[in-house]
Image (cartoon, rainbow, N blue to C red):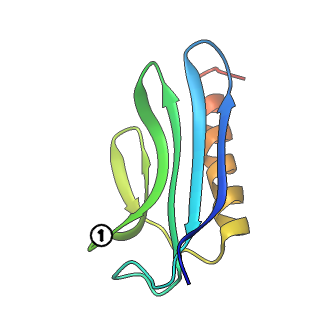
């Protein structure tokens, strides 16, 4: 099996902020993860990542908010997308963007 694109989307919120969501299904997990997905979900404001979810080799699943990095428990693509949307909505509320 080869890597297969699950989703690639860009959502424009305004002139200075957008989200980009990219998820791939992989033939083998990216260590130390045990699932077969590689993902990068980011919300960018004025050129700066303010919210992000990703998994990197050696780091595993984690997420970012305002420069802080925290562990993330991956439980499926649908939940990942829901968690990202919730985190972006919370950031926008906290920063007066809604």
Q: In the rendered image of this protein, does residue 20 appear above or below residue 80?
A: above
Q: Is residue 51 left or right of residue 8?
A: left
Q: Badge 1: few (under 14), some or many (20 or more) residues near its Cα, within 10 Å?
A: few
Classify mark 1: helix, strand or loop.
loop
The image position of residue 46, as x and y in percent, is 45, 18
Q: Which x, y percent locates residue 79?
A: 70, 67
Asked where in the image residue 30 lies, by quadrant, the reply is bottom left
- Residue drawn at x 46%, y 87% as measured from the top left: 34
11 with respect to 43 (left or right):
right
47 lies above or below 40:
above
**Relative to 4, residue 91 above or below:** above
Measuring 51% from the left and 61% from the top, which residue is drawn there? 39
Q: Quadrant of the N terminus?
A: bottom right
Q: Is residue 48 visible?
A: yes
Q: Quadrant of residue 48?
A: top left
Quarter placement of the C terminus = top right
């Amino acid at each position: 099996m080869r890597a297969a694109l699950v989703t690639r989307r860009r959502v424009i919120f305004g002139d200075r902020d957008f989200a980009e969501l990219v998820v791939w299904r992989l033939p083998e997990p990216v260590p130390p993860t045990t699932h077969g997905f590689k993902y990068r979900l980011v919300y960018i404001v004025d050129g700066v990542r303010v919210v992000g979810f990703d998994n990197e080799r050696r780091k595993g699943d984690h997420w970012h908010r305002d420069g802080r990095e925290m562990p993330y428990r991956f439980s499926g693509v649908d939940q990942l997308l829901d968690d990202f949307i919730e985190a972006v909505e919370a950031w926008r509320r906290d920063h007066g963007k809604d």
